Image (cartoon, helix red, strand yellow):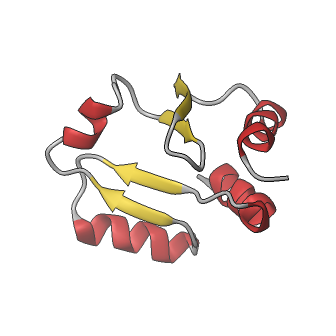
């Protein structure tokens, strides 16, 4: 998640919004974790797994890049390959 915070910080001025979705933990657990780590991106809760099912999540972490028109550009199960690869993908979908 520190890498997601870095991406958010680097690309927010270009239109990137990082949103994470937590599955299986309580509101209090998630709030404590986010506040303790000082993450500034939004963290949503998917208590019943409906959102995960819609995006085909079969393992955690799963990263989904959605462009500004709402079209899914990529889905990666597991950790993303490298920060450079993530930045390349993000640069391709954010406004110049």
Residue 63 picture location, percent across and down: 52, 36
Residue 75 picture location, percent across and down: 52, 26
- 51 or 47, which is in the foreground? 51
- 42 or 17, which is in the foreground? 17
Q: Residue at x 24, y 50 (%)?
A: 46
Which residue is most to the left?
Answer: 48
Residue 74 picture location, percent across and down: 57, 27
Which residue is most to the front?
Answer: 69
Total of numbered circles in the picture?
A: 0
Residue 87 picture location, percent across and down: 80, 41
Left or right position of 71 against 30: right
Tell me: residue 9, above or below residue 95: below
Q: Residue at x 18, y 51 (%)?
A: 47
> Quadrant of the rendered structure where residue 17 is?
bottom right
Q: Residue at x 77, y 59 (%)?
A: 11
- 69 or 47, which is in the foreground? 69
Left or right position of 80 against 62: right
Tell me: residue 84, above or below residue 2: above
Left or right position of 85 against 76: right
Q: Residue at x 48, y 77 (%)?
A: 35
């Amino acid at each position: 998640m520190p890498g997601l915070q870095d991406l958010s910080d680097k690309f927010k001025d270009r239109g990137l919004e990082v949103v994470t979705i937590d599955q299986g933990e309580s509101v209090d657990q998630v709030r404590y974790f986010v506040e303790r780590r000082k993450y500034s991106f939004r963290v949503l809760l998917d208590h019943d797994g409906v959102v995960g099912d819609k995006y085909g999540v079969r393992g955690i972490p799963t990263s989904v890049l959605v462009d500004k028109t709402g079209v899914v550009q990529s889905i990666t199960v597991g950790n993303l390959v490298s920060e450079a690869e993530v930045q390349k993908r993000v640069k391709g979908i954010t406004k110049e």
